[in-house]
Image (cartoon, grey):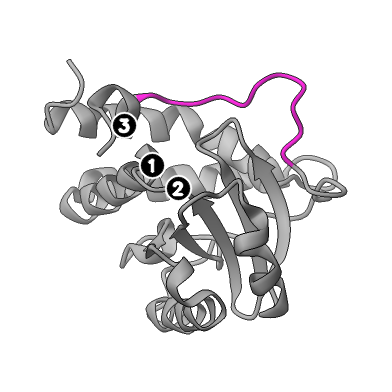
């Protein structure tokens, strides 16, 4: 289990380090839509595909992000956390996922060994981490916090729509990383409020 300090620490990308596998994602228009009751079924479909591809390599598989929170508007992308024994051992899982239609797009060894793969149908971002990763805990806590605190859910919903509007007002739009950067101050404030309520942060 990660320590309280590890769970509450916010991470920033090291300057000059590119996360992209291949060419960076081009700018596009960020779409935030109302909650879709079909998203849990989309996750179930993706999870079945991952489990069929990897079998016992899968240590944990969770639906995370905004599409996992009923009532929360979101980009129509299913976010999934996959835990494997060693995300740095790409040969143990990436070829099998690629054969199942996933595309490896992000490699961030400085952030808990994170790798990300995309799938187009349904649109999915698959995040790969290792055991006892604090980010897994953070995602689960945040999801439950939003379910239990309608004021913060409403704040986050407004923040997401506002961030999309800011990014889309730029010539050519932006990327998910641009969108996340606009949201970040509010997201971190909600996280810190949550951590204090759980006694993880003074």
Disc 3 versus disc 1: nearer the observer: 1
Question: In the image, residue 98 lies at what x, y percent?
Answer: 71, 72
Q: CA–CA distance between discs 3 and 1?
A: 9 Å
Give the labeled residue for mark 3.
Answer: 7
Q: CA–CA distance between discs 3 and 2?
A: 14 Å
Give the labeled residue for mark 1.
Answer: 133
Magenta span:
9-19
**Marked residue nearer the N-terminal end (3 or 1):** 3
Give the labeled residue for mark 2.
Answer: 130
Magenta stretch, overall SS: loop
**Marked residue nearer the N-terminal end (3 or 2):** 3
Provide the secondary structure element on which disc 1 rests.
loop
Q: Quadrant of the C terminus?
A: top left
Disc 3 versus disc 2: nearer the observer: 2
Judging depth in this view, the residue of 112 and 124 nearest the camera is 112
**Count of picture labels:** 3
Judging depth in this view, the residue of 100 and 120 nearest the camera is 100
Residue at image coords 29%, 51%? 140
Residue at image coords 61%, 51%? 89
Judging depth in this view, the residue of 72 and 50 nearest the camera is 50
* Tag 2 near tag 1, CB within 8 Å: yes
Q: Is residue 20 above or below residue 57?
A: above
Question: In the image, residue 136 lies at what x, y percent?
Answer: 37, 47
């Amino acid at each position: 289990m990660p320590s309280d300090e590890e769970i509450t620490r916010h991470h920033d990308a090291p300057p000059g380090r590119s996360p992209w596998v291949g060419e960076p994602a081009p700018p596009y228009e960020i779409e935030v839509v109302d909650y879709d009751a079909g998203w849990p079924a989309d996750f179930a479909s993706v999870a079945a595909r991952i489990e069929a591809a990897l079998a016992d390599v899968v240590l944990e598989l969770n639906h995370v992000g905004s599409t996992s929170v009923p009532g929360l508007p979101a980009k129509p992308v299913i976010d999934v956390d996959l835990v494997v024994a060693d995300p740095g051992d790409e040969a143990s899982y990436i070829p099998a996922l690629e054969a199942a239609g996933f595309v490896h797009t992000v490699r961030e060894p400085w952030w808990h060994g994170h790798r990300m793969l995309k799938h187009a149908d349904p649109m999915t971002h698959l995040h790969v981490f290792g055991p006892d990763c604090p980010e897994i805990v953070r995602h689960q806590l945040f999801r439950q916090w939003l379910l239990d605190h309608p004021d913060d859910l409403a704040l986050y919903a407004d923040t997401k729509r506002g961030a999309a509007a800011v990014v889309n007002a730029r010539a050519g739009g932006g990327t998910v990383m641009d969108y996340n950067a606009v949201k970040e101050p509010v997201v971190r404030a909600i996280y810190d409020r949550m951590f204090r309520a759980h006694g993880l942060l003074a």
